[in-house]
Amino acid sequence: MRKKIRIFGLLVVLLIVAVPVAGAWVSSYLHRPLPISETFTVEVTKGAGLSRVLYNLKRDGILGEGVDARCRRVGARIYSAFTGMDGRMHMGEYQLKPGDSLLSLLEKMDRGDVLQRSLTLVEGWNFRELRARLAALETLEHRLKGLTDEQVMAKLGRPDLHPEGWFAPETYFYTRGTSDLTILARALERQERILDAAWQQRAKDLPLQTPYEALIMASIVERETGVPEERSEIAGVFTNRLNKGMRLQTDPTVIYGMGEAYNGNIRRSDLRRATPYNTYVIDGLPPTPIAMPGHEAILAAVKPATTESLYFVARGDGSHYFSKTLAEHRRAVREYQLRRREGYRSSPGGGQ
């Protein structure tokens, strides 16, 4: 009897010693760096549990091989059992870098520290280019496919708005599975705030009657600007023209009105063709913006530079030469455009 008691006592002692040792040994595998030499993205799909995640990690060789992989899986399950993280895992992408451990991944999934991706909307893009960019991103949920522009704006709660110009060209962060419609909604809300704030700061005697006219003007300024510092000066030229009843005569509006017919060149016949956007033919502003203006272009439109200039021409380096008189402008045209040098570069559009 005493012998059995001694054996039982020995077993208890062994268990007391062995369990912590085994636990520490398994735990050490949770803390060890994973065998990866480059950044790796782990995706947790909707409804996936820890077992599925561990299976995928083992399949991709992220847990190592043999004993290493088994100990890491056991350690992960023990961690989940004690913390309850399996029921709290957040769907999304998680980024692993060389030197990261399995424990760091488990903690990220427990916190929902998902990978943030970024999308930059570029100043001067039109709505067609914006939609094409969104459609090309595989990480977004595509809800715009097959919708007309009018249907897109209706989905955004703005059924009466023409889409052009209403989306702020900035960088937006998102996680995998975010919808393209969500990105547009954020960009629309941002542009509305920018425009409203800028309109409150507008200069006195501005020949623009509404914030929407300011947005139209800003889009033209954006497309005409090759050097950011010239935005205000270019806006000043167009403001002067409107005040004097002169036509804007700006190429970017003509190009926009040509649509897909534009092949990189504007012919004289294009300048004479009547479209709602041909500012060589129409008086005042076109009916809608022609591109996405950035914050600075909107500020330039509502607070243009005080200038006597009525004309500008591209120098060929992205900047412009500004003129007060038609005679001076014609001399500048001969200097900078009719005698183009090698390496000549115009701005996005040409002012006249």
Image (cartoon, rainbow, N blue to C red):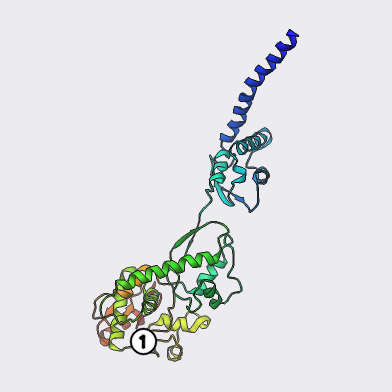
Question: Mark 1: few, some, or many residues within 10 Å (few <14, many ≥20)?
Answer: some
Where is residue 191? Give x, y as percent.
42, 69
Q: Is residue 275 above or below residue 105?
A: below
Quarter of the rendering containing residue 208: bottom left
Residue closest to the far front = 1
Depth check: 5 or 272 in front?
Answer: 5
The residue at which mark 1 appears reads as: 284
Closer to the camera, 349 or 28?
Answer: 28
Q: Is residue 121 visible?
A: no
Numbered-mark total: 1
Point out residue 108 in the picture as x, y percentages from the top left corner: 54, 45
Q: In which quadrant of the rendered view does residue 343 lie?
A: bottom left
In which quarter of the view is residue 255 placed?
Answer: bottom left
Would you place residue 248 above or below residue 57 in this image? below
Name the residue type under label 1: Gly
Q: Quadrant of the N terminus?
A: top right
Location of the C terminus by quadrant is bottom left
Secondary structure state at the residue bearing disc 1? loop
Left of 331 or right of it: where is 273? right
What residue is shown at x 64% (from left), y 24% (from top)? 19
Residue 88 visible from this viewpoint:
yes
Residue 105's x, y, as percent? 56, 43
- Closer to the camera, 195 or 257? 195
Q: Position of residue 159 (x, y in %)?
A: 51, 77
Q: Residue at x 63, y 54 (%)?
A: 46
